[in-house]
């Protein structure tokens, strides 16, 4: 059974692939029988999901320590 980190990684890969696919062949928004299809909204939703999954992925990886050195004048 895959771990939560593996599940998140697969979801990130799937969403990123869908974003690439939609970016390569952009579609216009349209209306059919009173229902509106907004491709830009769909793309925005995918990007938001990707950001959320990446944040979750970083939280699962644990704290990150950054080191820096001051530069004397």
Image (spheres, grey):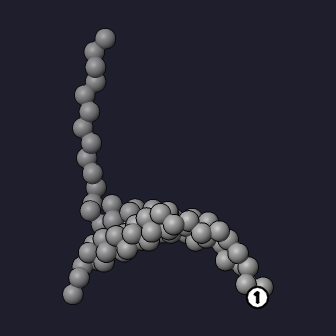
Secondary structure of residue under mark 1: loop
Asked where in the image residue 17 lies, by quadrant, the reply is bottom left
As drawn, the residue found furthest toward the front would be: 25
Residue at 28 percent across and 20 percent down: it is 71
Residue at 67 percent across and 71 percent down: it is 29
Asked where in the image residue 15 lies, by quadrant, the reply is bottom left
Residue 8 x/y as whole percent: 33, 73
- The number of numbered discs placed on residues in the rendered structure image is 1
Asked where in the image residue 31 lies, by quadrant, the reply is bottom right
Question: Between residues 37 and 47, which one lies in front from this camera angle?
Answer: 37
- Is residue 32 left or right of 59 when viewed as pictured? right
Q: Is residue 50 visible?
A: no
Residue 37 x/y as whole percent: 67, 77
Residue at 51 percent across and 66 percent down: it is 25
In the rendered image, which residue does mark 1 sit on? 33
Residue 21 x/y as whole percent: 45, 69
Question: Between residues 64 and 47, which one lies in front from this camera angle?
Answer: 47
């Amino acid at each position: 059974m895959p771990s939560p980190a593996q599940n998140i990684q697969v979801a990130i890969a799937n969403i990123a692939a869908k974003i690439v696919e939609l970016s390569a062949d952009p579609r216009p928004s349209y209306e059919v029988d009173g229902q509106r299809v907004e491709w830009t909204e769909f793309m925005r939703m995918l990007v938001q999901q990707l950001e959320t999954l990446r944040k979750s992925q970083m939280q699962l990886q644990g704290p990150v320590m950054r080191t820096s050195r001051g530069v004397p004048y």
